[in-house]
């Protein structure tokens, strides 16, 4: 499902102009990370994708729907949104019911709901915890419940708001796996993140925002190469990108594989 | 807007410099005089000769009129209407006006005016108090006089928690609507939406309460040492005299009720 | 002489079967900067609560062994006395705001009011602490109106102003963006430079590598490894047991398997070490 943002402006009631003319297209099945300092407009932008915010000017289309013409509860069938803090959404007595809440709201058939719930639980490694009360789980597992409760809605677009904040290495690996599986299923995944290493290793396209405008938008390697521009919105390049640059590698790298390949070639040519 | 959690207006004025307890006693004197004092016109006189001039003295007259207007006039107006229409027919039952099957009597209007003016005194005296008294000063002063520190903490924390709860509630609503919850449909749908909205608010508050308890404990909140206060709170001889004067007024007001001449 | 001394400490929360921490022996010297790493559920927060006296004085449960700080034993002290020696700050800055104060200045003075510091001295201490953490310009703001990084600096300042001997920090930057993280670490670094004993739980390895004198790796409630950052953070045990490690370390480990990292060289934990190692190999 294609997302088209056209000349989008948003001004909050208090008068803060959070978005100042954003235009972009996200094709079906793309993996996009949004980066930039707090206040750059990342959250304001993605809250337009499921209608939580409405444009002050300009428009947002999700497939053939103009978000101004559809309620949030309708848009929920197209765009799933995982909020940063799981504790702001968990309320049922067990994990299974929590994960079933979204698809039930969307009016899916009981068989489909069961199938989607089982699948989402398996993907987030929660199957053995499905009878547990979410509040008896650790905060890392509550985060996975929040993820599962959106994945089970089977929306073509999934948004993650700061998925790795406060998570340990094992859980970050689990979340990266969820992103990979969703990509394989052809879902569009959009992530807001400050975790630039996670972003570099899991997303093909990066959009950097600064002061309500698009600062950079393109393939991850190209965006990460622009360290001076990124610094203006307080984004440091990933560790391996910085290392490659310091060593003088001729290309920009963003993960271990790319680094080692470039490094091998680099020392080969030097010798 | 987030920066503004109290009514307090920071200004240099002689009313601001009055001890918080003195002002509080004064507020109660106004209220008790209005409700128990003699005379039909007393509450009105208290407003015209007491509270309004004091608002000028405290240099908060603009804020006072604005808040009183917005908060009080609708309530007082409604009260006046209800009381004059529905007041039982006793006393002077000359009919002034007929509304549908109801008669508005002279006694009804008198009673309504009295009730409305009393409420006006009560609320507007508090408004004046809140405009010119910093809550921290009041609490520090009361703690110094022996009020429990925990009680004072609960009061000031409650003052601040409401806007935070509102912000939290709106995030929860957003999160659940994003999961397809329809919050603006039929009554049944709204009732169904209650648990998904209140559940996270309650659970979240429990976590918050525990962490906050740890945080204030880490700063020796329950220390057995005698507490001091950052703010220097004035308490002059004049303050003491004024408090005795207002107490006297309170006693006189009750007296006039108990032993009507 | 060690300012912190834990002997064979085991603790079990009420209504649980397994201890959250087990057989912990830990000595920390005055002025030392000790970092604690570990996966979630390793017992890091429990250890922080034990050091800061909330175990056993706030959380009940079963505490065995001895916890001694500045020569006083936690079991023989009370919480309100204990917190004067050990300051605690934790993850969520929002929940650390007292909630009863209207400005940052008042917020920082809160602890000093509680222990009866005279007004003149109180003001001097509040102002000095704010200058030290570079938040003087926030003095008149409402604590609620601040960014996360600013709130966390206010929370730290509110503890520092009490002048504890030991500072215990439980993931103070986990909710922070990169700017907030940098702001908070600048404060921690400053405190350590002034000779305060710091015990820090942190996931962000890059910062630990830079600042810590010693690293303790906690796993399943027990101390798995202990040593200098270079020793602990490059141990092959960490990735096996679900610890996060620096990308510099992991890439060099892969590289050394392919003969691209000098075999005699310790794996890097900082950018500079990685640059030095990979650059040297070229010569």
Image: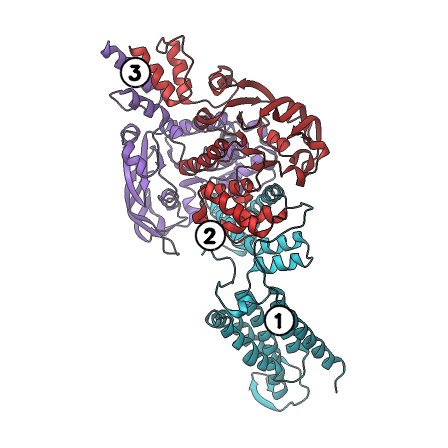
Chain colours: A purple, B cyan, C red
Where residue A195 appears, x then y in whole percent?
A: 41, 32
Quadrant (top left, top right, bottom left, bottom right) of the N terminus of chain C? top right
**Is there a contact, CB below 8 Å, between mark 2 and mark 1?**
no
Residue B121 x %, y %? 59, 75
Question: Could you tell whether C276 is left or right of B228 in the image?
Answer: left
Query: Is the residue at mark 2 from the same chain as the one at mark 1?
Result: no
Residue B198 in view (yes/no): no
Label of residue C141 in the image? 2
- Left or right: C130 with respect to B43? left
Disc nearest the viewer among 3 and 2: 2
A103 and A232: which is toward the camera: A232
* Picture quadrant of residue B50: bottom right
Nearer to us: label 3 or label 1: 1
Which residue is labeled 3 in the image? A263
Callout 1 environment at 10 Å: few (<14), some (14 to 19), or many (20+)? few
On residue B238, the disc is 1
């Amino acid at each position: 499902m294609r997302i088209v943002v056209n000349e989008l402006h948003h001004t909050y009631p208090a008068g803060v102009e959070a978005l100042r003319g954003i235009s972009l297209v996200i094709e079906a099945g793309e993996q996009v990370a949004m980066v930039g300092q707090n206040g750059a407009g990342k959250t304001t932008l993605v809250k337009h994708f499921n209608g939580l915010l409405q444009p002050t000017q300009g428009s947002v289309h999700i497939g053939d729907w103009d978000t101004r013409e559809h309620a949030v509860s309708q848009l929920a069938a197209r765009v799933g949104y995982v909020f940063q803090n799981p504790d702001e959404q968990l309320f049922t007595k067990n994990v299974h019911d929590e994960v079933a809440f979204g698809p039930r709201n969307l009016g899916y058939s009981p068989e489909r709901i069961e199938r989607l719930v089982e699948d989402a639980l398996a993907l987030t490694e929660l199957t053995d915890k499905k009878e547990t009360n979410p509040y008896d789980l650790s905060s890392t597992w509550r985060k996975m419940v929040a993820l599962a409760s959106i994945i089970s809605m089977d929306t073509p677009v999934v948004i993650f708001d700061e998925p790795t904040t406060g998570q340990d290495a094992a859980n970050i690996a689990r979340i990266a796996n969820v992103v990979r599986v969703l990509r394989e299923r052809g879902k569009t995944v959009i992530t807001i993140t400050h975790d630039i290493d996670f972003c570099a290793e899991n997303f093909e396209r990066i959009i950097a925002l600064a002061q309500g405008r698009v600062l950079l938008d393109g393939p991850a390697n190209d965006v990460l190469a622009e360290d001076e521009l990124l610094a203006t919105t307080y984004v440091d390049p990933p560790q391996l990108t910085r290392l490659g640059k310091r060593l003088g590698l001729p290309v920009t790298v963003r993960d271990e594989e790319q680094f080692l390949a470039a490094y091998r070639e680099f020392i080969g040519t030097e010798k | 807007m987030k920066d503004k959690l109290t009514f307090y207006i920071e200004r240099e004025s002689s009313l601001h410099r009055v001890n918080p307890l003195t002002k509080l006693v004064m507020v109660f004197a106004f209220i008790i005089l209005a409700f128990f004092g003699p005379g039909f016109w007393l509450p009105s006189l208290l407003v015209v000769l007491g509270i309004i001039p004091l608002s000028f003295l405290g240099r908060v007259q603009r804020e006072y009129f604005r808040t009183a207007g917005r908060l009080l006039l609708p309530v007082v107006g409604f009260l006046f209407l209800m009381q004059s229409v529905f007041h039982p027919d006793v006393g002077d039952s000359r009919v002034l006006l007929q509304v549908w099957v109801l008669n508005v009597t002279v006694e009804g209007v008198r009673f309504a005016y009295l009730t409305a003016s009393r409420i006006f005194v009560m609320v507007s005296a508090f408004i004046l108090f809140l405009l010119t008294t910093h809550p921290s000063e009041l609490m520090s002063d009361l703690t110094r006089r022996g009020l429990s520190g925990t009680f004072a903490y609960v009061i000031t924390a409650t003052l601040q928690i409401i806007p935070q709860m509102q912000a939290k509630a709106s995030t929860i609503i957003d999160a659940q609507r994003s999961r397809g919850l329809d919050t603006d449909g039929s009554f049944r749908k709204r009732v169904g939406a209650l648990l998904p909205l209140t559940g996270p608010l309650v659970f979240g508050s429990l976590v918050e309460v525990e962490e906050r308890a740890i945080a204030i404990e880490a700063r020796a909140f329950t220390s057995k040492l005698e507490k001091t206060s950052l703010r220097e709170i004035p308490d002059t001889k004049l303050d003491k005299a004024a408090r005795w004067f207002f107490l006297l007024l309170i006693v006189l007001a009750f007296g006039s009720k108990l032993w009507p001449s | 002489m060690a300012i912190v001394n834990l002997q064979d400490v085991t603790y079990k929360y009420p209504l649980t079967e397994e201890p959250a921490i087990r057989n912990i022996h830990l000595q920390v010297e005055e002025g030392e900067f000790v970092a604690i790493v570990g996966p979630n559920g390793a017992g890091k927060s429990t250890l922080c609560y034990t050091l800061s006296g909330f175990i056993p004085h706030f959380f009940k449960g079963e505490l065995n062994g001895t916890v001694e700080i500045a020569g006083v034993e936690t079991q023989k002290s009370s919480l309100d006395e204990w917190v004067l020696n050990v300051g605690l700050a934790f993850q969520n800055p929002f929940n650390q705001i007292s909630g009863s104060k209207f400005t940052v200045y008042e917020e920082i003075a809160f602890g000093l009011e509680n222990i009866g510091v005279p007004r003149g001295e109180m003001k001097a201490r509040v102002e000095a602490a704010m200058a030290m953490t570079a938040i003087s310009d926030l003095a008149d703001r409402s604590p609620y109106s601040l960014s996360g990084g600013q709130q966390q600096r206010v929370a730290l300042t509110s503890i520092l102003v009490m002048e504890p001997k030991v500072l215990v920090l439980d993931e103070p930057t986990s909710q922070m963006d990169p700017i907030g993280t940098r702001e908070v670490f600048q404060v921690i670094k400053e405190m350590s430079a002034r000779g305060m004993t710091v015990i820090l739980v942190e996931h962000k390895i890059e910062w630990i590598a830079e600042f810590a004198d010693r690293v303790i790796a906690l796993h399943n409630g027990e101390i798995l490894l202990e040593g200098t950052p270079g020793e602990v953070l490059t141990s092959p045990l960490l990735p096996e047991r679900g610890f996060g490690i620096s990308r510099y370390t992991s890439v060099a480990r892969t590289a050394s398997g392919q003969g691209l990292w000098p075999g005699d060289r310790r794996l890097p934990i900082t950018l500079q070490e990685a640059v030095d190692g990979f650059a040297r190999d070229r010569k």
